[in-house]
Image (tube, rainbow, N blue to C red):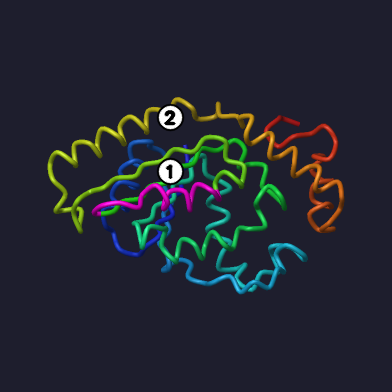
Amino acid sequence: MKTVVINGQNHKGSTYHIGIELAEKIGGEITEFFLPRDFGEFCVGCTSCFLNGEDTCPHANKLKPITDAMDEADVIILTSPVYVYHATGAMKALLDHYGFRWMVHRPEEKMFKKQGVVISTAAGGGMKSTNKDMADSLHYWGIPKIYKIGMAVAAISWEKISPKKMEKIHKETDTLAKQIIANNGKVKPGLKTKGFFGICRLIQKSGYNPKDMEYWKEKGWLEKRRPWKER
């Protein structure tokens, strides 16, 4: 298995340690990225990715290593500590660059067979909204199986987490790693994903964006072909 871990901060705090612990328990090849170290650009809102293609984004070359790693991975793990009840600005800046990959535009068909994980930590609260920030993108990319870990660690560093809380973390990553391994190569979109894909298909038939419509036609999705089915 191949796992890519994208961390929404540069430092190796509690969120990072939970993410890498899970990745190591899953096993296989692990690729890591740290934000903003490995990508720190803000989307400038030029809409070029939508209208002219993702290669025309002014940050396309910087983004490519992350895109390639996600496409090659079986599991995508996004981690972010809670910043004012939401994901870090660096994580949000990265995800903004993948708007063109949402189902309503030009989703990558490989995503419909992957598993995704979102992980957030805080001393107190905000994990639910932070995980939602990241899970929204995974879902609208087409990933059919998304897991969430939100942990109130009651500490400001990994080293200061209590033994009881640490035991809970280890048990949760143990359980989740086993689920991910068992589901590898077996996940399929549910009714929610299929239903939204169907709505997007109707939108594409109207031809509101020629670049998107051309993509859907090439994929055969305007006919009977679907991204989660073998050719």
- Front-lying residue, 43 or 36: 43
Question: Who's the residue at 69% across and 35% down the image?
Answer: 195
Which mark identifies residue 181?
A: 2
Q: Position of residue 212 (x, y in %)?
A: 79, 54
In magenta stretch: residue 165: no
Q: Position of residue 186 (x, y in %)?
A: 55, 26
Sequence-earlier tag: 2 or 1: 1
Which mark identifies residue 211?
A: none
* Residue that carries the numbered disc 1 in the rendered image: 29
Q: Main secondary structure of the magenta part?
A: helix
Q: Is residue 115 above or below residue 66?
A: above
The answer to whether marks 2 and 1 mark residues whose Cβ atoms lie closer than 8 Å is no
Q: Which residues are magenta?
A: 123-137
Mark 2, other Cα within 10 Å: few <14 / some 14–19 / many ≥20: some
What is the three-letter code of the residue carrying label 1? Answer: Glu
Q: Is residue 135 above or below residue 35?
A: above
Alpha carbon distance from label 2 to label 1:
13 Å
26 relative to 72 in the view: left or right: left
